[in-house]
Amino acid sequence: MTTRAAKATTRPVRSRCRYKKIPPAQKLSYDAYAGRACYACGRTLTTGAILVGRATGRQGVHVLDVDVYACP
Ligand SMILES: [Zn+2]
């Protein structure tokens, strides 16, 4: 009889990405602007992405404001 030590390693991974200053919308990568990647490190987001805030920007009359997400 073997008893497996069920060590739950479900420690939440906390990245520091969300503490990074949100860049102007023009500086975001295409994927970050589309909400598919972390605005800080550029990694593609899967689940648990955190809505950090809004990057703001303008291009002529066009408002480029967009929500930005960070790694969990
Ligand atoms: Zn990140």
Image: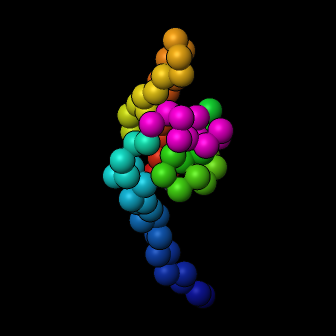
Residue furthest front as drawn: 60
Residue furthest bottom as drawn: 1
Q: What stretch is highlighted in magenta?
A: 24-33
Q: Is residue 64 left or right of residue 34?
A: left
Magenta highlight on residue 55: no
Name the chief secondary structure element in magenta: helix
Residue located at (52% from left, 12% from top): 61
Front position in the image: 7 or 67: 67
- Percent x, y for residue 65? 47, 24
Compared with 47, 41 (above or below) is below
Front position in the image: 5 or 23: 23
Residue 11 seen from this side: yes
Residue located at (53% from left, 41% from top): 27
Residue 49 seen from this side: no
- Percent x, y for residue 50? 44, 42
- Percent x, y for residue 13? 44, 62
**Residue 59, quarter of picture:** top right
Residue furthest top as drawn: 61
How many marks are shown on the rendered structure?
0
Compared with 19, 62 (above or below) is above
Residue located at (46% from left, 27% from top): 57
Front position in the image: 44 or 59: 59
* Quarter of the rendering occupied by the N terminus: bottom right
